[in-house]
């Protein structure tokens, strides 16, 4: 499954393998709030963004590029924020928080 970042909020009820903007990224930053459903256990490819043509978008993370591991616990929420300086050709990601109750 892929997830449009237009939603910016998502209840995870199945595996999310990639994020794809619905339109060209005209914003410079955005946040995504991901909440596992009551079952949990679903993986999220938080580092897997593609453009509308299906081409990968590079995502850079602090700490030498260590990709965060999204929470898979039932009913828990993670928040991630992203910023672009080049119209969406690349993204810089940070963890706003993980495992919120």
Image (cartoon, rainbow, N blue to C red):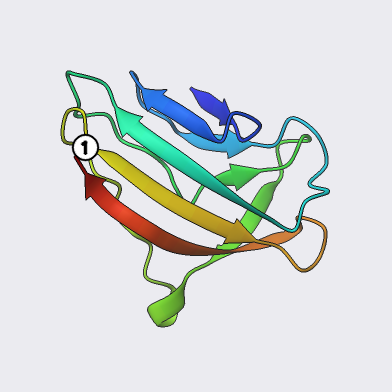
In the displayed structure, 38 sits above or below 99; it is: above
Residue in the image at 30% along x and 47% along y: 70
Please identify the residue farthest to the bottom as the structure is shown. Answer: 64
Does residue 30 appear left or right of residue 44 in this picture?
Answer: right
Q: SS for tag 1?
A: loop
In the displayed structure, 60 sits above or below 20; it is: below
At label 1, counting other C-alpha atoms closer than 10 Å, the crowd grade (few under 14, some 14-19, many 20 or more) is: many
Residue in the image at 52% along x and 36% along y: 18
Residue 9, image x and y in percent?
A: 49, 32
Instruction: Tell which of 34 and 19 is nearer to you.
Output: 34
Could you tell me which quadrant the C terminus lies in?
top left
Instruction: Tell which of 91 and 57 is nearer to you.
Output: 91
Residue in the image at 75% along x and 58% along y: 28
State the residue position of label 1: 72
* Location of residue 6 by image quarter: top right
Residue 64, image x and y in percent?
A: 42, 81
Instruction: Tell which of 65 and 73 is nearer to you.
Output: 73
Residue 34, image x and y in percent?
A: 39, 36
Residue 83, image x and y in percent?
A: 65, 62
Residue in the image at 45% along x and 28% along y: 10
């Amino acid at each position: 499954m892929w997830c449009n970042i237009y939603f910016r909020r998502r209840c995870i009820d199945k595996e999310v393998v990639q994020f794809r903007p619905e339109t060209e990224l005209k914003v410079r930053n955005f946040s995504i709030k991901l909440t596992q459903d009551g079952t949990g256990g679903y993986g999220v490819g938080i580092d897997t963004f593609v453009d509308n043509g299906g081409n990968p978008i590079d995502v850079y993370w602090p700490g030498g590029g260590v990709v965060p591991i999204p929470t898979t616990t039932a009913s828990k929420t993670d928040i991630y924020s992203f910023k672009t300086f080049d119209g969406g050709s690349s993204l810089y990601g940070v963890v706003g928080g993980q495992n919120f109750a």
